[in-house]
Amino acid sequence: MKKSIILVLIASLSLFGCTDDFEGINENPNQPEEVSSDLVLSTVISTLANRSAQSGWNNGNIVAQLTAKINFTGFDRYDWGSESGLWNEYYGILPEIDIILQAARAEETQNTSYEGIALVLRSYVFSILTDNWGNIPFSEAIKGMEGNFTPIYDSQEAIYTAILQDLQQAEGLLAQGEPILGGDIIYEGDIEKWRKFANSLRLRYLMRVSNRIDVSSEIQAILDSGMFIASNEDNAVMRYPASTQIDSWPISTSRIGSFDEHRLSETSEAVLKQFNDQRLEKWFQPTDNPEDDPTLFVGLTNGLSEDNASNFNGGASNVSRINQSFFYDSPNSVQAAIIQTAEVHFIFAEAAQRGLINADAETLYNEGVRLSFEYWEVPQDIATYLAQDGVAYDGELETIITQKWLASFLVGLEGWYDFRRTGLPSVIVPGPDNVNGDRVPVRFLYPDSEQTLNSENFDAAVSEIGANDINIKGWWEE
């Protein structure tokens, strides 16, 4: 029997009791007193997918040097102030995820699939928060309704332990097969794909902590199960119908001037050209001077000052822009990606290369390469591509991570996280005008509001990690 997942959000006003008709008099006919979890779910998914896309565009591609900034170069130079926007947005979505979770666990509205989905999405949010800041409010993060507005900060180790347990539990809950009644704008109610999504995120996080704990048996078990994102059809991505600005690829609705700040990076240009990689033409466009050479692609050095960036190679028209026809003019061409099959295959390839699992690293690596080109609909001759020096599998971790880095284009901050974990690809080096002592930062600064509103716990957290500094490594990086 279908179960309607409904959570009452507004308690009866009669609890305060004044007159018998107080509730009726104060009822707002335009504001619903109940909210359906399927409606909340669609909002949560769209918020998280959009944020992944925007983070990839504004932060991830820049710090991983897949792109560079020609104006407003502060982030590219590591001039990182207190970061409150991402913090507030991710913490702001957690209560809505909790609405789904609590409703799914309530006796009258129980649904194991919604419970599993909520655990998957909550794990994803907390992973980003801890990867960006280290120790963060976790166990007491959304206790405001209970009067706790000053949550403690949990260690990154404790948070990852809980995330990995939650994702394993989520896959088991989803395996029970209870129907998803609506709101699933990623998989349209396909429970098996949600199970693959849960296991694939777990793979990502197992690899993240693999330098700290033994994860070999868990990765092997997921590989042997076959329950992971194995094709681009199973990717955790959101597609944009583009019927309005609200449901369009968010970068296409920004100002053209803001879009134009982002350019081809000299770092990625060198790698893409070295490998005759046709993703260069998919992601970028030639310079604005076709009379010189209509196929000329020129990358911008990362980490330049405003003056040096704007005058690089004689000016902005001589530096390749990001492909405007694809990434700006077409509001439904780009997908917002949370995790893709190419990344999953590179995780398995790395695990095999490091001896963590019993599998053929070369086969998994080659498939990861092929799947990335397939995702971007680039007609690369894969056999020829894979035969090149620097691409052909040679047993070296950098070969795997370099291709994983290219495949992380627009996938949130994944390229940065991998660089922090491995130091690869080695082509990522601080730009000449960086303001961080020639070091790539490894975390964001806590928001100023935490020091003001949660000072005691903020101070304890800063003391535990060593300093509120962008160069303080997290637990899984050491």
Image (cartoon, rainbow, N blue to C red):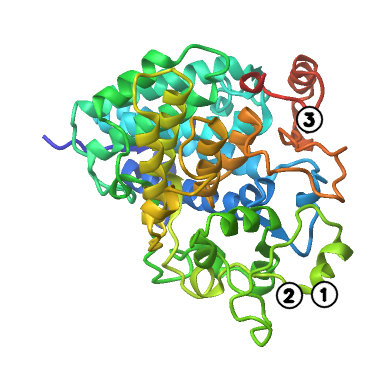
In this rendering, position of residue 118 left or right of residue 231: right
- For marks 2 and 1, give the CA distance: 6 Å
Q: Nearer the viewer, mark 2 or mark 3?
A: 2
In this rendering, position of residue 423 left or right of residue 383: right
Q: Which mark is residue 471?
A: 3
Q: Which mark is residue 318?
A: 2
Determine whether 460 is above or below 238 in the image: above
Q: Earlier in the sequence, mark 1 or mark 3?
A: 1
* Quadrant assignment, res 121: top left
* Quadrant assignment, res 129: top right
Q: Amino acid at mark 2?
A: Asn
What element does badge 1 sit on?
A: helix
Q: Residue at x 69, y 46 (%)?
A: 63
What element does badge 2 sit on?
A: helix
Q: Residue at x 75, y 18 (%)?
A: 465
- For marks 1 and 3, give the CA distance: 34 Å
Is residue 32 in sight in this rendering? Answer: no
- Mark 3 Cα shell of 10 Å, populated few (<14), some (14-19), many (≥20): some
Q: Amino acid at mark 1?
A: Gly
Determine whether 385 is above or below 249 in the image: above
Q: Nearer the viewer, mark 1 or mark 3?
A: 1
Q: Residue at x 38, y 42 (%)?
A: 366
Residue at the limit of the structure toward the left, as seen here: 1
Q: Earlier in the sequence, mark 2 or mark 3?
A: 2
Q: Which mark is residue 314?
A: 1
Is residue 133 in sight in this rendering? Answer: yes
| Marks 2 & 1, CB-CB < 8 Å contact | yes
Quadrant in the picture for the C terminus: top right
Residue at the limit of the structure toward the bottom, as seen here: 291
Q: Amino acid at mark 3?
A: Asn
